[in-house]
């Protein structure tokens, strides 16, 4: 058992650590760092007290089926030779999520960031 712990320690002590998305975004503290990481923004919004850099990554669509006993061929199963009711329409839900990053800048300093539908972890140097 002791050999297992030593092997486990050796394997994982030499591996690169990942910063999670929140940590990686929090490390971007200047306008230059944001541009170096993501390039020019999709949209720049000028407000009274800050400038907002908006990066649009599109829309993610996810289809999930809903189980309904009225149309389920499993719950109405009557034997191995019964044909399913092919005229029953499959019910599903379509979820759309807008994927974006948003950075608020006061001068060259990042004062706020927000993200939705994206994850950008980073390897530690």
Image (cartoon, grey):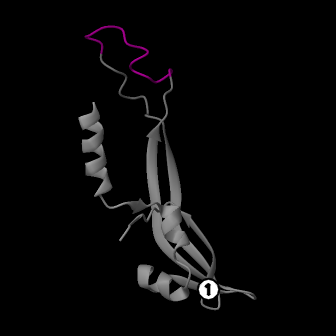
Find residue 73 and report its image quarter. top left
Instruction: Name the spot of residue 26 as percent of width and height, x first.
Output: 55, 70
Find residue 50 and report its image quarter. bottom right
Instruction: Residue 111: say if magenta.
Output: no
Q: Nearer the viewer, residue 34 or 51?
A: 34
Instruction: Name the spot of residue 35 as percent of width and height, x first.
Output: 47, 85
Instruction: Name the spot of residue 47 as percent of width and height, x first.
Output: 71, 86
List the single residue furthest toward the right: 48
Image: 87 above or below 114: above
- In this picture, which residue range is highlighted in magenta? 69-82
Image: 24 above or below 86: below
List the single residue furthest toward the top: 79
The quadrant of the image that shows the N terminus is top left
- Name which residue lies at 32% across and 61% down: 16
Q: Nearer the viewer, residue 23 or 34?
A: 23
Question: What secondary structure characterizes most of the magenta part?
Answer: loop
- Name which residue lies at 26% across and 50% down: 10
| SS at mark 1 in the image | strand
Find residue 38 and report its image quarter. bottom left
**What residue did someone put label 1 on?**
109
Instruction: Residue 76: say if magenta.
Output: yes
- Name which residue lies at 38% across and 67% down: 124
Tell me if I can see residue 16 in this picture. yes
Image: 55 above or below 15: below
Instruction: Name the spot of residue 111 as percent of width and height, x first.
Output: 65, 78
Tell me if I can see residue 99 in this picture. no
């Amino acid at each position: 058992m002791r050999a297992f712990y030593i092997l486990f320690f050796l394997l994982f002590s030499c591996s690169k650590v990942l910063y999670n998305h929140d940590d990686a975004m929090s490390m971007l503290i200047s306008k230059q760092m944001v541009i170096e990481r993501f390039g020019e923004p999709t949209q720049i919004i000028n407000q009274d007290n800050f400038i907002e850099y908006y990066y649009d990554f599109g829309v993610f669509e996810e289809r999930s089926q809903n189980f309904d006993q009225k149309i389920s061929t499993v719950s109405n199963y009557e034997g191995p030779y019964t044909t399913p009711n092919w005229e029953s329409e499959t019910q599903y839900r379509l979820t759309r999520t807008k994927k974006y990053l948003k950075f608020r800048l006061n001068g060259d300093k990042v004062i706020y960031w927000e993200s939705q539908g994206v994850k950008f972890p980073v390897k530690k140097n």
